Amino acid sequence: MSTVAHETVSESGPTGTPEDREILSVAREQVLVGGVPLEEAQILRVMQTSDAVLGDLLGLAHEVRMRWCGPEVEVEGIVSIKTGGCPEDCHFCSQSGQFTSPVRSLWLNIPELVKAAEQTAASGASEFCIVAAVRGPDERLMTQMREGVKAIKQAVDIEVAASLGMLTQAQVDDLVDMGIHRYNHNLETAKSFFAQVVTTHTWQERWETCEMVRASGMELCCGCLVGMGESLEQRAELAAQLGALQPDEVPLNFLNPRPGTPFGELPLMESGEALRTIAAFRLALPRTILRYAGGRELTLGDLGTREGLLGGINAVIVGNYLTTLGRDPSEDLALLADLKMPIKALSSSL
């Protein structure tokens, strides 16, 4: 177990309002002791807590993570097999072909994929995720996936995941046959806010792909992007909807406004709000892998990144993201070592 933890203040202590202390007390008993996730109204109340109890909240979320997930941290690298030129209009995404954001269409070949997988494994990652900026895969992409996954598995010992948009049942079955370990398809935001973010497909279409993946036996990775102008109520709604879907992993992205997109002028989320969001999602998803994903570098910085790892996060994407730069992998690995958090792929040698 990790030897690092937040100091906590007793429930009768002077910090926070009575309502703050009440929801922390309820969450401790319900989630930490009982393993029962918070419901939507409770998640909202956690997101409304004051800065005075933020340390206590993060400490509780860390305890929940340690009890129900254990001390290991899963590290993953991602690479885009097809970048840019996407026909969808996700308002946060610079890969949409409908916006003026400067991302050009690009396809990786098989040797490039294998090289990226080898580099990812060398960083200590246990998983390599192949991503494509598409509505859903066509036969060209599925063929390249078959060839690429086979070549990766022959070259390096690493789990292969994929994120290729919305799927048919036949495509789900094909990915299973390839040996894809985990499939990523994000809900992105709450059902009630989705039409403000995407107009070219529906939230329900995303949900249906997630259900097919979950039923297939592949692990389901289903994440979100916060800080797009949604209300706290909608953020709590999203956390509850993810809880109902029961994904194996939830990547938590923070909006990094991209020039040329409809959301390009939105402000960054305030770091305290981001940390409360992390803790609330952990209390809503006590047994789920909660992964740091895009935008954390700008939203949280170095200190906030450390606090989030001690506030419920138990997985990290290392290196760069699809169209934005991330932290140097060595910085994240050094931070995990400093916090005495064993990396899943390296646990046997630590």
Image (tube, rainbow, N blue to C red):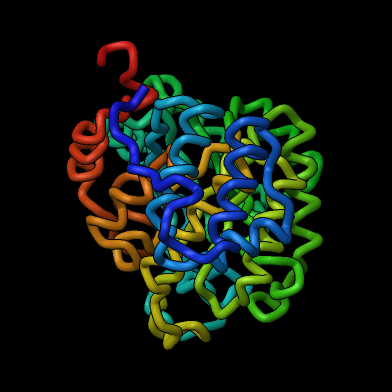
Find residue 143 and report its horizontal and vertical position in percent: 60, 40
Find residue 108 and report its horizontal and vertical position in percent: 40, 50
**Residue located 61% across and 28% down the image:** 178
Left or right: residue 335 compared with residue 187: left
Left or right: residue 309 compared with residue 209: left
Q: Look at the picture and state if 82 lies above or below 63.
A: below
Is 72 or 58 nearer to us in this picture?
58
Q: Which image quadrant: the C terminus?
A: top left
Is 186 or 302 nearer to us in this picture?
302
Is 168 or 206 nearer to us in this picture?
206
**Residue located 67% across and 70% down the image:** 234
Find residue 152 and report its horizontal and vertical position in percent: 42, 28
Count of numbered badges drawn on the protein: 0
**Residue located 64% across and 57% down the image:** 43
Is 231 or 267 nearer to us in this picture?
231
Any part of residue 335 in sight: yes
**Residue located 51% across and 27% down the image:** 67
Any part of residue 148 in sight: no
**Which image quarter: residue 335?**
top left
Q: Which image quadrant: the N terminus?
A: top left
**Which image quarter: residue 156?**
top left
Find residue 37 and report its horizontal and vertical position in percent: 68, 42
Q: Look at the picture and state if 204 lies above or below 150.
A: below
Left or right: residue 350 compared with residue 321: left
